[in-house]
Image: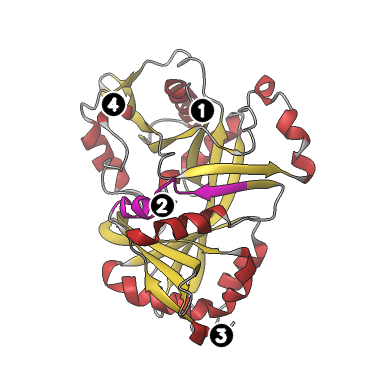
Amino acid sequence: MKSKEYEFTLATAEDNEAIKNLFEHTNYKSVLDLQFRRGTDPFASFMQEDAGAVVMLLKHKITKDIIAMGACSFHEVYINGEIKRGAYLNGLKILPEYQQILSMMPLAFQTIQEATQSRTDLYYATILQPAKNLQQIFEKKRRNMPIYQKQCLNTAFIISPAHSTKGLHLEKGNVDGLDDFYEKHLINYNLAPVNRKMHGVCDEDFITWRENGTIIAACAVLNNQSTKNYFLNSYNGILKPLSHFPTRLLGLPAPPKTGESVNNASLSLLLFDESVDIPSRARFMKAASSFAREYDMIMIGLNDTDPTYHAFDKMIHLKYNSYLYTVNWGEVQNINNRPIYLDVAYI
């Protein structure tokens, strides 16, 4: 592939079908062929990110065929206790017949940096844990490539919704004092949003746990399947028998059906007062999931710098692991040792 035959361009709404095609034809060879998609209008879904996004396309100069894309979504976040502009580098999408395009990655990174550097203070990205080849590519220092610094293990925990709150007195839709709760706690994390105004979440979605009138835990049930959905193509290898196994008897979600999008929601904006112990955090998450019984499974995103991560040692769950990296061009910007917050709905 000759780079002079291709060009990088910024996407517009007119490119929506081509972007949709890239999401639907990017597969990862694994025992679970699960595609991450962005609904029927992926370009709009990028623009609905916290502070918008830049979507970069690779086009053939003559045919105008779109063969690859990358995107950078912007978020106002806390970094080292200050409000900064964060930029999440979304995974590269390449049509299978053009995998040799990886040789153009330095130019792709240069192009997206030039288009976004005025809008961000810190870039970050995730790479799936099983993708060892990609980790090796990005972790090694290379000429004309940014430096990827591994920060933590990021996990999407998957649980089956509970049938009841199991003795916990939780409230849904009562946002009295909620802004103060989030203002107090979000600043203690790196990459945390600066408030609870996440796209797709309204006041009615919030669940609170109060002791003597004071909020000690909160989260929101978020259904963002219209903008970010997971489509299951097939079970392969050792997972084939699992598709017919009665997993609900083990307390796990029922296996999703192939050829369909997964009916899931997430417990987003999940935070606890530091006084809440680990077993109580597990009880709250399970109890809060009972407000989302219409979904087949619930996702909760946490990383291993967060104390709540270890609450899942006491819960029946499945998990999907990735690594979180900060991405630096030139001088490396360090983040301090505050725990990292990265909501599953933002990646």
Q: Which of marks 2 and 1 is nearer the N terminus?
A: 2
The N terminus appears in which quarter of the rendering? bottom right
Examine the rendered structure and indicate whether residue 305 appears above or below residue 331.
Answer: above
Residue 260: image x %, image y %?
58, 37
Residue at mark 4: 204
Examine the rendered structure and indicate whether residue 289 appears above or below residue 44.
Answer: above
Residue range in magenta is 34-50
Residue at mark 2: 42
Amino acid on which disc 2 is placed? Pro
Residue 40 is a magenta residue: yes
Amino acid on which disc 1 is placed? Pro
Residue at mark 1: 279
Q: How is the image coloured?
A: secondary structure
Tag 4 near tag 3, CB within 8 Å: no
Q: Residue drawn 50% across and 33% down? A: 264
Q: Separation of disc 3 and disc 1 at Cα?
A: 57 Å
Mark 3 or mark 1, whichever is nearer to me: 3
Q: Residue drawn 62% across and 36% down? A: 318
